[in-house]
Image (cartoon, rainbow, N blue to C red):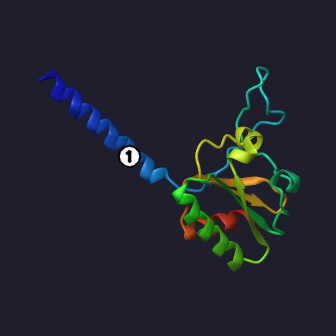
Amino acid sequence: MTGVWVAVAVLLAATVFGLVRRRRDGVLRPAPVRAAGAGKDGDGTVGESAGDTLRPDELGADLGEKATLVQFSSAFCAPCRTTRRVLGEVAEMVDGVAHVELDAEANLELVRRLNVVRTPTVLVLDGAGRIVRRAAGAPRKADVIAALGVAIP
């Protein structure tokens, strides 16, 4: 009888985890602001990632005049293809917005610095390259457009 209770508990925990992950997946949230002077901790680990500014040389492409949509992808990521299409369509729709896709494996230093833990991860940068929104998972087109409303004054 104990085995049945263990199985029920495991199924319940897995269901709750799945529902929470589905609800949070692809949601563009405000980027947390890092305290001035924060960054590498004394032990060499990286602190909170957001509040960072990304430069064109780090991205390997020019920033958009008004905003930039940065996507971290990997070779075998199925949602990355959907995200690429959505971000590309939004960048074509809105003047001054660029879409930059980066291979997470080829940019490990940037991945570590920005605390990218899964692909796709999407960052919305303002015209100066500051991270204003971020999402883990494939965002919806309407959510990306709404996030641009925050990035573009």
**Residue furthest front as drawn:** 75
Badge 1 marks a residue whose secondary structure is helix
Label 1 Cα neighbours within 10 Å, binned few <14 / some 14-19 / many ≥20: few
- Residue pictured at 59% horizontal, 56% vertical: 28
Q: Which quadrant of the figure has residue 95?
A: bottom right
Q: Which quadrant of the figure has residue 10?
A: top left
Is 152 drawn above or below residue 108 in the view shown? below
- Residue pictured at 69% horizontal, 63% vertical: 150
Is 45 drawn above or below residue 105 in the view shown? above
**Residue furthest left as drawn:** 1
Is 109 drawn above or below residue 29 in the view shown? above
Q: Amino acid at mark 1?
A: Gly
Measured from the top left, where is residue 88 in percent x and y?
66, 71
Q: Which quadrant of the figure has residue 8?
A: top left
Measured from the top left, where is residue 114 in percent x and y?
71, 42
Q: Which residue is mark 1?
A: 18
- Residue pictured at 53% horizontal, 59% vertical: 79
